[in-house]
Image (cartoon, rainbow, N blue to C red):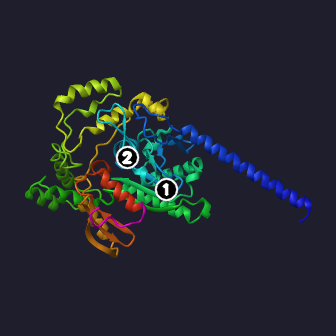
């Protein structure tokens, strides 16, 4: 090699190193711009390493998705990255997943601030919550026609674009094991996103691939036939509907048909109305009897409203508060909270209130339907249906298939991490470590 050739190679190498260093500095600056200090009402200890902000997924349309990210409580450089998606479709991953279920900072029991969650999933992983699809929570678009084009494919494509761009902002997590999680309608979002990631990885060099290792979904809504068959059988087996009504539904409804008949739609409407006096999302929990439809975005008005409703509120059983979503909505609609979270409160989104869907499903996406569609996959069974344990009690039951495990959490409604936080932490720990659920008392 001549001296001039060597000099050119050295120059190219120097330029490459300089560009790499510049990109790393830019990414670090973008990260720090999204770092959060203390949110309004957040306890001063323990310290929580958290970031939130926007990642653009379509510059032309001005479409951006909002995220809230918590680094693992210990050894974040060694822990996997876990993405959480709520369902609905239209439920907020910030309002439900992060602030109500499995994040390290939960809205407290009156909506005045936050409290530390000792069962937070960032004990086991770096935890990323995404507001998806666009139009949910704080995610926004400057092109209103985007909202007319949303379907599962659109959502999967946007979420993949978000991940690619988020990893550019947080490149230190690109090589980490990556898992996707969620609940309810995320039974569509999660596996479809996994498929998109898998398909893209096949055409990318190893250092550009997303290191997808698996996915987990709670109370997954997946297939109308099995899901609605499960809804009807659950309602009958839990004394919501009579024998006569159960026979009527079976006679007039064929859930394989899409769209269904008018007669079937009518009887299903009647079935859902039978849940009006109880919580369909957790049939054994008390129902919220306060008026949550007019929760004010003003913190002062919310406190005053709660004081007036206090006498009407149900007695809480085992710490469960059926009106909890009202407090979360009140907290996240505070302007000081939205400003602290780096949420967009000045653009197209400003005239639309942030709101929550109802939660704690069990009658809505019952395990009966999940068993039907899992069995329909025809997978070979590795281990038979058996109990798993937590603190000397049966915590649920599970069965292992080739490539898939199906588990129940005893006594939980739709939002398992909210209803049974300790058991949910055991479940996610076993999943991430690829271990069996405990089959003897612990």
Question: Splitting the image into 4 quarters, where does residue 32 fall?
Answer: top right
Q: Residue at x 40, y 70 (%)?
A: 403
Q: Which residue is mark 2?
A: 97
The number of numbered badges drawn on the structure is 2
In the rendered image, residue 385 lying in the magenta stretch gets the answer no
Magenta: main secondary structure equals loop
Identify the image quadrant of the C terminus.
bottom left
From the viewer's side, name the closer residue of 236 and 17.
17
Labels 2 and 1 touching (C-beta < 8 A): no
Q: Which mark is residue 182?
A: none
Left/right of residue 223 with respect to residue 139 in the rendered view: left
Q: Circle 1: is it few (<14), some (14-19), or many (20+) Cα within 10 Å?
A: many
Return the x and y of residue 137 as percentages of the image width and height.
41, 39
Kind of element beneath mark 1:
loop
Q: Which residues are magenta?
A: 432-442
Residue 27 sits in which quadrant? top right
Horizontal relation, residue 274 to residue 112: left or right: left
């Amino acid at each position: 090699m001549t001296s001039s050739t060597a000099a050119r190679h050295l120059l190219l190498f120097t330029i490459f190193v300089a560009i790499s260093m510049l990109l790393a500095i830019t990414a670090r600056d973008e990260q720090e711009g999204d770092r959060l200090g203390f949110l309004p009402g957040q306890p001063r200890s323990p310290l929580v390493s958290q970031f939130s902000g926007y990642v653009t997924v379509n510059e032309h349309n001005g479409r951006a998705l909002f995220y809230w990210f918590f680094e693992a409580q210990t050894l974040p450089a060694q822990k996997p990255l876990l993405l959480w998606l709520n369902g609905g479709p239209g439920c907020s991953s910030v309002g439900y997943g992060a602030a109500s279920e499995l994040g390290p900072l939960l809205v407290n029991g009156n909506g005045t601030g936050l409290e530390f969650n000792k069962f937070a999933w960032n004990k086991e992983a770096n935890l990323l919550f995404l507001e998806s699809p666009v139009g949910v929570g704080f995610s926004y678009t400057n092109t209103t026609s985007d909202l007319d084009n949303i379907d599962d494919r659109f959502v999967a494509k946007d979420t993949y674009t978000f991940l690619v761009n988020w990893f550019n902002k947080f490149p230190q997590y690109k090589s980490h094991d990556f898992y996707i999680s969620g609940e309810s309608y995320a039974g569509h979002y999660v596996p479809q996103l996994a498929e998109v990631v898998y398909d893209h990885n096949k055409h990318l060099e190893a250092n550009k691939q997303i290191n997808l290792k698996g996915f987990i979904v709670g109370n997954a809504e997946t297939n109308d036939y099995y899901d609605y068959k499960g809804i009807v059988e659950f309602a009958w087996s839990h004394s919501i509907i009579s024998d006569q009504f159960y026979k009527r539904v079976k006679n007039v409804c064929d859930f394989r048909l899409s769209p269904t008949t008018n007669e079937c739609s009518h009887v299903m409407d009647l079935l859902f109305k039978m849940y009006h006096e109880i919580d369909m999302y957790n049939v054994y929990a008390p129902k919220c009897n306060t008026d949550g439809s007019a929760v004010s975005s003003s913190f002062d008005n919310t406190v005053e409203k709660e004081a007036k409703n206090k006498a009407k509120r149900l007695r809480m059983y085992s710490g469960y508060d059926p009106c909890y979503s009202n407090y979360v909505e009140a907290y996240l609609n505070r302007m000081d909270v939205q400003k602290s979270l780096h949420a967009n409160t000045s653009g197209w989104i400003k005239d639309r209130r942030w709101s929550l869907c109802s939660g704690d499903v069990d009658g809505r996406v019952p395990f009966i339907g999940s068993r039907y569609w899992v069995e329909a996959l025809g997978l070979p069974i590795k281990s038979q249906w058996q109990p798993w344990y937590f603190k000397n009690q049966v915590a649920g039951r599970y069965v292992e298939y080739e490539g898939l495990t199906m588990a129940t959490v005893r006594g939980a409604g739709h939002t398992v991490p909210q209803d049974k936080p300790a058991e949910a932490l055991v479940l996610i720990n076993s999943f991430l470590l690829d271990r069996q659920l405990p089959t003897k008392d612990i």
